[in-house]
Structures are given as C-alpha cells and as structure tokens.
Amino acid sequence: MAADVVAAVALGLAVACWRAGPAKRLRAPEGRWSRVVGARLRASRGRVSGSLAAAGSALLLVAGLGWWGIPLAVAVGAASYVVLGRLLSGEATRRREQIVADLPQACDLLAVCLDSGLPLRGAVEVIAGALDGPLGGLLGEVAAKVRLGADEAEAWSELAGAEPVLGVLGREMARALGSGVALSGTLRALGSGARGDAAAAAEERARRVGVRSVLPLMTCFLPAFLLLGVVPIIGGVAQHLLRP
C-alpha cells in the first residue's frame, strides 16, 4: 500500500513537471542571464518528468515488495535520467549542427533581400518561410515579435540570448540597427564568418568519426590477428616444448 502511494506521488510529480511549462505570451524583456537560466530549466524539465515517470512505473510493477521496491525505483529513475540526458544532448547537438550549417545561406539570402529593397522585417519573414529546420523557426519568432510591435534590436538581442549559436548574428544585427550601419554588408560579413565556422564544424565531425571508428575496427580485426598470427606461434612453441 505504501509503495502504491509513493508510485502515485511520483507519477503525479512527473505530470506536474511535464505541464509546468508556461504558455507563450508577450512579457517584459529579460536579462541575458535570466534567458539562459530559463532555457536550461526548460531543457531539464523533460528529463525530470521522464525519470519520475519511470520511477513511478517501476514502483507500480514491484508494488508487492513494499518498501523494498523504493530503492529499485530510485535506481530506475536515476538510470532514466542519465539515458534521457544522453538522448536529449544528442538531439540538441544535431539541432545546433543544423543551425550552423544553414546560417551562411540565411545570411546571404537576407543580404540579397535587403539589396533588392525589402525592409528587414519583410526579409526575415521571407527567409524564415523559405528555410526548413530550427533556424527558420527561430527567424520566424523574430519576425513575429517585430510584427506584434516589439523593437527590432531587442528582438535580435533576445535571439542572441536564447540561442548561443546565433549569438554573433543577434548581437551584430542589434548593434547595426541601433547605429544605422548598412545591414546588407553586416550580413555578408556574418555569412562569410558563418561559412568558415560551418567548414570547421564539418572537419571536427570528420575527425570525431575517425576517432570513434577505432574501437569497432579493433573489435573486428583483433580476433582475426590473434587467431592467424598469435595462436599459430603459441601452438608451434608449445608443440616444440612438449615434443619428447
């Protein structure tokens, strides 16, 4: 009975954590530190709710053990927290890599739109609709904020705080909007720098693939080397020593 109560409490906490996210609405501008902390808390909410749900489910399955099932449920919850962290970190890495890969093209397209006479807010809306993936969604959020009356420089500053990969783009765009610098030139320079960053990121991924492939290759070739190279030598030496 006690295990059932603890399991129900764990599942209730999991549901509460999952539904704890605030509804999206207009709010007063936040500082950079508040935005970063808020983003990390939102990212960890899924891990906490998932681990609590796993712990509660495990406790329900072993409810017959009574209080002895609680340590097992805690272990299941801790393991779920670690596994979910690895899965979510992999998803965040893929998202960041896609943003880095799409950023040079987005900067070039924004510069072309500005050179053709479109205002910045219109150019951002057009490019956000043309791009697939997370970068298009982030630019769409900037365009939506400006369309609802937010200051353009503040919208770009919030983008820099919300997505570290776009920090340089957001800060430079906010600075250019505040100082009156030509935006197309700034965007072309940012696109050139982003292209170099994307190339460096691709090289780094290629190096990681080479390092990660060492262990599978060793697993494949080491047994064959032992069987074909070492075992015959040992067998020959043993036969020579054991020969009367």
Image (cartoon, rainbow, N blue to C red):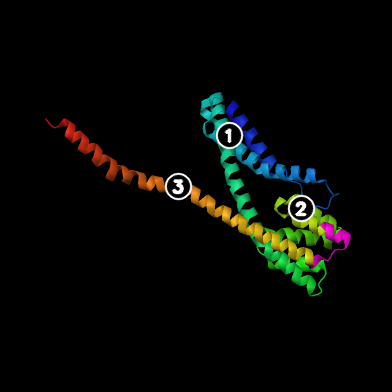
Q: Identify the mark nearer the N-term, 2 or 1.
A: 1
Mark 2 closeness class: few <14, some 14–19, many ≥20 residues within 10 Å: many
Name the spot of residue 49 as percent of width and height, x first. 64, 40
In magenta stretch: residue 64: no
Instruction: Determine the CA span between mark 2 and mark 3.
Output: 38 Å
Which segment is the magenta one?
Answer: 174-184
Q: Identify the mark nearer the N-term, 2 or 3.
A: 2
Identify the disc placed on residue 78.
1
Residue annotated with mark 2: 160
Amino acid carrying mark 2 in the image: Ala
Amino acid carrying mark 1 in the image: Ala
Name the spot of residue 41 as percent of width and height, x first. 71, 42
Q: Secondary structure at mark 1?
A: helix
Q: Is residue 149 visible?
A: no
Question: What is the number of callouts on the image?
Answer: 3
In magenta stretch: residue 177: yes
Closer to viewer: mark 1 or mark 3: 3
Amino acid carrying mark 3 in the image: Val
Q: Which is nearer the eye, 161 or 134?
A: 161
Identify the disc placed on residue 165.
none
Direction top: furthest residue: 67
Instruction: Determine the CA span between mark 2 and mark 1.
Output: 33 Å
Q: Is residue 186 left or right of residue 192?
A: right
The chief SS type of the magenta part is: helix
Residue annotated with mark 3: 214
